[in-house]
Amino acid sequence: MSFRPEAIRGGERPAEAVVDYRLTRQQVVAQYRKGRLSRLDVCDAHPELRRAASGAGRPTGEPCPICEEAQVVLVTYAFGARLPAGGRLVTSARELNQLARRGSRVACYVVEVCPECAWNHLTRVFHPGRA
């Protein structure tokens, strides 16, 4: 007997899921609020990520869990074959659809960023164009 996903699904290619990091986020925020993590520990976004958030981020309407003054935005980066080594900033749904139609596998990383205090957290990872 095989324990590979193909054996369980009758030989079909397994569907890929979205990996969600909400529980990890809740844990980090809870540790910060309890004083176990400092603001310097959790507000460490790279300057380029903060620029991307200010220029191309998608507003969420949610307040930052750390500074509670600014709203967090979502920034999406794509990584894969024939993309820059540092990833490609995805700025629109149209661009995401184009990446999904590519023949090669692409992984997208969605990061929550506060442009004001530099809070950042990986929100989810997904592969566009997959079942």
Image: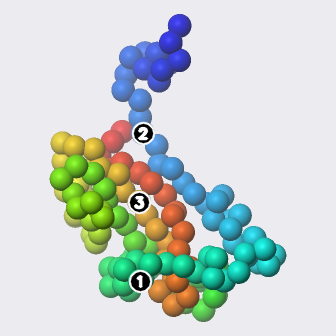
> Is 117 situated left or right of 18 in this image?
right
Judging from the image, what secondary structure is the residue with disc 1 in?
Answer: helix
> Is 33 situated left or right of 76 in this image?
right
Residue 55 occupies which quadrant of the picture? Answer: bottom left
In the rendered image, residue 102, in percent from the top left (x then y), is placed at 18, 48
> Is 57 situated left or right of 97 in this image?
right
Residue, disc 2 = 16
Judging from the image, what secondary structure is the residue with disc 2 in?
Answer: loop
- Name the residue: 61% across, 60% down: 22
Q: Residue furthest right?
A: 34
Evaluate if marks 2 and 3 touch, with contact meaning CB atoms under 8 Å apart.
no
**Mark 1 or mark 2, earlier in chain:** 2
Vertical comparison of 99 with 112: above or below: above
- Name the residue: 47% across, 86% down: 115
Residue, disc 1 = 47
Residue 9, visible in the rendered structure: no
Query: How far apart, in angstroms, are the residues tagged by discs 3 and 1?
Result: 18 Å
> Is 13 situated left or right of 85 in this image?
right
Q: Amino acid at mark 2?
A: Glu
Badge number at residue 109: 3
In the rendered image, residue 80, in percent from the top left (x then y), is placed at 27, 51
Q: Amino acid at mark 3?
A: Tyr
